[in-house]
Amino acid sequence: MVYSIYAAASNLWLAAAKKGTVMSANSSEKKAANPGPLGLLGFGMTTVLLNLQNAGIIELSIVIVAMGFALGGMAQIIAGISELREGNTFGGTAFTAYGLFWWSLCLIWINPIGVNPADNISKGFYLALWGVFTFFMFLGTLPHNTITKTVFLSLAVLFFLLSIGDFTENLHITRIAGYVGIFCGLSAIYSAMAQVVNGEFGRKIFPT
């Protein structure tokens, strides 16, 4: 009898141990989350909102500043750091840099330390530098899918148009840039949603 109880207990222990090993193996095989959609949404939604203002559809207000600080800045920085931790240099550089761009833009708008406000020439150089950076990032997208190339190319065009608009003080160029920016932001939102939906279904629902 004692032997039977011992044998039954041993069998239960072995079954539990085997189950734990299987669960542990499954846990170790669990796929890491993709931070890309968060970063793309942070970029895309704030880009659309800002460029509604550049296109003359809405006014610059706390709505854009708050969105820029939270989703455009913080969400992209979180996504960028996550990409860097996973060894993705391109994604980490893009999201972190553009997240910090949004924080710097918010600081330019609110000017919390009271230095000389930004003039059109300084803003022109500021935007031109971001245009140069974005153009080189676009070159890095050439091996990537079509939607990623579209986002970065339209973003580079946006920065250069905004820069020219500030240098020349030509409102028509800024308005054109606004519509380019809306297209760019919507492209990024599409890319984010395509990654989420395709990932959930395990197959390509939305082409990229």
Image (spheres, rainbow, N blue to C red):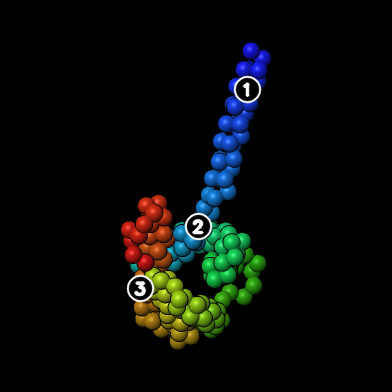
- The quarter of the displayed image where residue 10 is located: top right
Separation of residues labelled 2 and 3 (CA atoms) = 29 Å
- Residue 15 in percent (x, y) is at 57, 31
Residue at x 56%, y 62% (from the top left corner): 83
Separation of residues labelled 1 and 3 (CA atoms) = 75 Å
50 left or right, relative to 4: left
Q: Identify the residue under disc 1.
A: 7
- Of 189 and 53, which appears nearest the observer? 189
Quadrant of the image containing the C terminus: bottom left
Answer whether labels 1 and 2 touch (C-beta < 8 Å). no
Image label count: 3
- Of 147 and 161, which appears nearest the observer? 147
Element at badge 2? loop
Q: Identify the residue under disc 2.
A: 34
- Residue 168 in percent (x, y) is at 45, 87
Q: Identify the residue under disc 3.
A: 179
- Tag 3: amino acid: Tyr
